[in-house]
Every structure is written in structure tokens, then in C-alpha cells.
Amino acid sequence: MPQLIDLSTFGEDEGKLTVFEKILPGDIKRAFYIYGVPYGQERAKHGHFTATNALIIVAGSCRVQVSHSGQEDTYILNSPSQALILHPGDWHIMDQFTPDAVLLVMSNQYYDKNDYFFEKP
């Protein structure tokens, strides 16, 4: 099941520093970011058999819909101090990106096309 967690964030007037550590099982082996997504465009539409991913919206906002074992949840990512953790088996779709949205994704697995499933559970 997905988890929306608050990341440790420090500072106020001088700016903020948010820490991402000890969130994913194992090491972070892959990181990428998604940006420039036209409004209305859908991304992802897949899940992973073994990878655990953390999604952090660095700027702007987007919506993430997650299905797992027949349960569906919707998350609005709009704060860089939160991470949405997607576990193996979580099928997801991302949409409603604002024009300034930058979505950072970190994974505990390297890219492997065989780790993807595309049918919604």
C-alpha cells in the first residue's frame, strides 16, 4: 500500500532544508525527474513487481492515483516536504501536472523493463 510521509524539514526565515534518508529499503539506485508535462497528459500507468519508489514534488503540483489489491487512493503532491512511497504491487498514474511541476522519483532498483506491469490490479 502507498504511504504519504512527512520528510524531516528544518529552517524557517533563512530557507528550508528537507532531508531524505532511511525511507527506501536498501540503497537509492536510480533517480530521475519529470517536468514539462502538458496539463491533461497522463504519465506512468504502470506498477513494479520489486521496486520501491519515492515520489517528491520539488515544484508545482500533480495528482497520483494508486491502485493496490482492489483499493484505490488519490494523492495530491504539492509540498517538497512530503514523499509518496510506492511499494511493489502499487499500480499508479500521474496527471494534473501544473506548468511548473517538477516530480523527483527515487528508486531502490535500477531500470529493468521486466519489473514493470501495466494492467491495473
Image (spheres, helix red, strand yellow):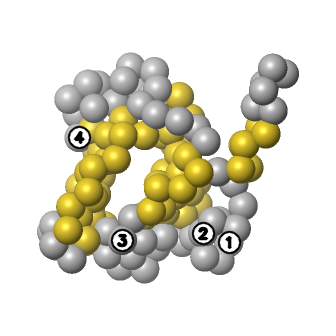
Residue to which mark 4 is pinned:
42
Residue to which mark 2 is pinned:
24
Task: Tell me, for residue 27, which label it has, or none.
Answer: 1
Instruction: Determine the CA span between mark 3 and mark 1.
Output: 20 Å
Query: First in sequence: mark 1 or mark 4?
Result: 1
Question: What amino acid type should be assigned to the residue bearing mark 3?
Answer: Met
- C-beta proximity under 8 Å, tags 1 and 2: yes
Q: Residue at x 45, y 21 (%)?
A: 100
Query: First in sequence: mark 4 or mark 2?
Result: 2
Mark 3 vs mark 2, foreground winner is 3
Query: First in sequence: mark 4 or mark 3?
Result: 3
Task: Tell me, for residue 1, which label it has, or none.
Answer: 3
Instruction: Determine the CA span between mark 1 and mark 2.
Output: 7 Å
Mark 4 vs mark 2, foreground winner is 2
- Residue 34 image position (x, y, % from top left): 45, 39
Question: What amino acid type should be assigned to the residue bearing mark 1?
Answer: Asp
Q: From the viewer's side, name the closer residue of 23 and 106.
A: 23
Query: First in sequence: mark 3 or mark 1?
Result: 3
- Residue 60 image position (x, y, % from top left): 46, 26
Tell me: 11 left or right of 36.
right
Q: Secondary structure at mark 2?
A: loop
Instruction: Determine the CA span between mark 4 and mark 3.
Output: 21 Å
